[in-house]
Image: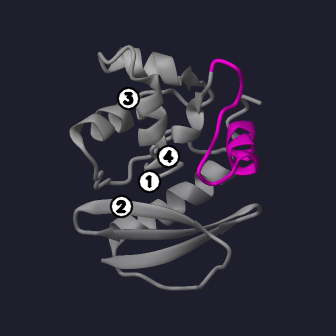
């Protein structure tokens, strides 16, 4: 497992990956300039750079999604939400054939280990923007990049 760091104007990310793909992205308060020889991690940094500039709408980086079957179903549903659009927790629950499990969808979102690329920021509550593990400010900024807000 290797790690690299990414820095954008309002965010620092610590990214973990190996030959199986990107497995974790953490929001951190610091940045370290680490080099990597892993092509997928290099691609991830490149794609994040383009995303934060507003030039990338779909990531192609290889992912290693970890979680329960339900969580993986949620994450796969998130990957289908188009750039610049949002869905409610209820809509995600319905899309994975668990129409009453919208709270469990929220719980799965909070456990998403690959935020931004697995776009849990594109899920909102019926009453507003909802929560976000990285903080509401980060969620709002991501939705602004995608021109939703």
- The local secondary structure at tag 3 comes to helix
Query: What is the quadrant of the C terminus in the image?
Result: top right
Residue at which label 2 appears: 22
Q: Is residue 66 visible?
A: yes
**Relative horizontal placement of residue 39, taking residue 112 as reference (left or right):** left
State how far apart marks 1 and 3 are (Cα): 14 Å
Identified at 54% across, 48% down, the residue is 116
Location of residue 6 in the rendering, given as x and y in whole percent from the top left corner: 59, 70
Measured along the vertical axis of the image, is residue 73 above or below residue 110?
above
Determine the image quadrant of residue 10: bottom right
Identified at 46% across, 68% down, the residue is 15
Segment colored magenta: 126-144
State how far apart marks 1 and 2 are (Cα): 8 Å
Identified at 30% across, 77% down, the residue is 1
Disc 1 + disc 2, Cβ < 8 Å:
yes
The label on residue 110 is: 4
């Amino acid at each position: 497992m290797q790690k690299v760091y990414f820095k954008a104007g309002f965010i620092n990310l610590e990214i973990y990956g190996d030959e199986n793909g990107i497995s974790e992205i953490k929001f951190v308060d610091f940045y370290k300039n680490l080099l990597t020889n892993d092509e997928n991690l290099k691609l991830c940094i490149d794609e994040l750079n383009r995303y934060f500039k507003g030039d990338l709408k779909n990531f192609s980086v290889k992912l290693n999604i970890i979680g329960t079957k339900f969580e993986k179903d949620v994450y796969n549903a998130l990957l289908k939400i188009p750039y610049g659009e949002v869905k409610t927790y209820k809509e995600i629950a319905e899309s994975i054939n668990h129409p009453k499990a919208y709270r469990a969808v929220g719980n799965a979102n909070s456990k998403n280990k690959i935020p931004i690329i697995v776009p849990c920021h594109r899920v909102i509550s019926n009453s507003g923007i909802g929560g976000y593990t990285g903080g509401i400010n980060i969620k709002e900024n991501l939705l602004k990049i995608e021109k939703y807000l």
